[in-house]
């Protein structure tokens, strides 16, 4: 919404600046129908551009928020799986590792 207002006022100010720079500038001509149409067109274009910019930025922000939530959920699941693995490792008895006997020595 801020972008919408900012671009609208920026274009409105630009229109007034360009109108003021005309050699035949007068305040009376500012309120003629052709001038008012130009001002309203500038405001309309500013609102349209601002709306598009706002829509795109909001969509980007929502996607980033969704990624953050998914990452947080994955981290939580990883911690739970690590806890379960640690519990299973503690419950299983430790068996000594015996070396594998070589039953077929001619293959070496």
Image: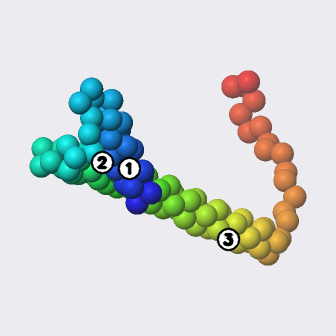
The residue that appears at 64% across and 62% down in the rendered structure is: 75
- Residue at which label 1 appears: 9
- Badge 1: residue crowd in 10 Å (few <14, some 14–19, many ≥20): some
Asked which quadrant contains residue 62, the reply is: bottom left
Nearer the observer, disc 2 or disc 3? 2
The residue that appears at 38% across and 50% down in the rendered structure is: 9
Q: Which mark is residue 46?
A: 2
**Residue 8, position in %: x, y?**
34, 50
* Marks 2/3: CA–CA distance: 51 Å
- Badge 2: residue crowd in 10 Å (few <14, some 14–19, many ≥20): many
**Residue 48, position in %: x, y?**
26, 51
The residue that appears at 20% across and 50% down in the rendered structure is: 31
Nearer the observer, disc 1 or disc 3? 1
| Residue found farthest to the left | 33
Give 81 or 108, whichever is nearer the viewer: 81
Callout 1 touching callout 2 (CB < 8 Å): yes
Asked which quadrant contains residue 54, the reply is: bottom left
- Residue at which label 3 appears: 80
Asked which quadrant contains residue 29, the reply is: top left
Q: Is residue 8 above or below residue 94?
A: above
Give SS at disc 2: helix
């Amino acid at each position: 919404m801020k972008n919408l207002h900012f671009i609208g006022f920026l274009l409105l100010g630009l229109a007034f600046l360009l109108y003021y720079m005309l050699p035949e500038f007068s305040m009376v001509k500012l309120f003629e129908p052709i001038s008012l149409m130009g001002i309203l067109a500038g405001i309309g274009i500013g609102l349209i551009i601002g709306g598009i910019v706002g829509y795109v930025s909001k969509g980007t922000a929502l996607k980033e928020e969704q990624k953050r939530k998914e990452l947080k959920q994955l981290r939580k699941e990883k911690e739970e799986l690590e806890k379960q693995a640690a519990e299973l490792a503690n419950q299983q008895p430790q068996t000594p590792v015996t070396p594998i006997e070589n039953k077929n020595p001619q293959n070496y």
